[in-house]
Image (cartoon, helix red, strand yellow):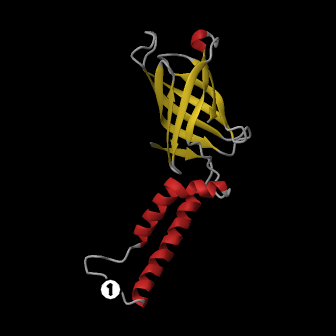
Amino acid sequence: MHPYSIDIEERKYIFLLLAVVSIVLSWGFYKALNYYKIILPWWVESPSVLFFYGLLFVIFDKWAWKFFRKMSFIKIPNLIGEWTGYLKTSFDEHSSEIEATLKIFQTWTRIKILLTTEQSTSHSETAFIVINAPEGKYLSYQYINEPKSEAVKTMSIHRGTVRLLFNEKENTLVGQYYSGRDRQNFGSLSFKRG
């Protein structure tokens, strides 16, 4: 997985909140040890602010953000899951729907997008989630595509860009892609999360 960018300042406020909670937890833990007269061995130090911050960050990044997302405290959309659909390509003048599967792995700060068809597999290298766009939330990412061994000879490894509009009510990702100079293709994609 790799980091992804967002267009809002949500993360800086969460980082600050985690820091404040970490200070309070560290102070409270130290006070509890003193109150109950618990003496730790010399080789064990009372958990520091950094320990609590690291622990809270891991918990929030992997799991808690989804809970806070449901409460509308977090605006980053949860795109995790397997999406099925199709793509149309300029290679065949958009005449056929090519079945495709999109798998998205996501934490609050990291993401990986895998798109698989019968002919090839592509994976994201960078990504950006736009939340405050007039047309709605969308995912944009750059990918590298690797043809499978049985793919047609005209296919080669190439890079490209995808932009998918996220419809939360219908649970769909719909958009366009274009590839780099090795393929010079463009097309449309449509997926629904199952």
Q: Position of residue 13 (x, y in %)?
A: 58, 61
Q: Identify the residue shown where x is 61% and y is 23%.
A: 86
Q: Identify the residue shown where x is 71% and y is 37%.
A: 170
- Residue 182 vs residue 33, the one in the foreground: 33
**Quarter residue 83 falls in:** top right
Vertical placement of 162 versus 68: above or below?
Answer: above
- Residue 153 vs residue 36, the one in the foreground: 36
Quadrant the C terminus occupies: top right
Vertical placement of 44 versus 6: above or below?
Answer: below
Q: Position of residue 164 (x, y in %)?
A: 63, 33
Q: Residue furthest left?
A: 43
Q: Is residue 106 left or right of residue 51?
A: right
* Label 1 Cα crowd, 10 Å radius (few <14 / some 14-19 / many 20+): few
Quadrant the N terminus occupies: top left
Q: Residue furthest front?
A: 194
Vertical placement of 29 versus 62: above or below?
Answer: below
**Residue topped by disc 1:** 39
Name the element at disc 1.
loop
Q: Position of residue 184 (x, y in %)?
A: 53, 16
| Amino acid at the residue labelled 1 | Ile
Q: Position of residue 81 (x, y in %)?
A: 56, 40
Q: Identify the residue shown where x is 41% and y is 89%.
A: 36
Vertical placement of 185 versus 49: above or below?
Answer: above
Q: Identify the residue shown where x is 65% and y is 29%.
A: 175
Image mark count: 1
- Residue 61 vs residue 19, the one in the foreground: 61
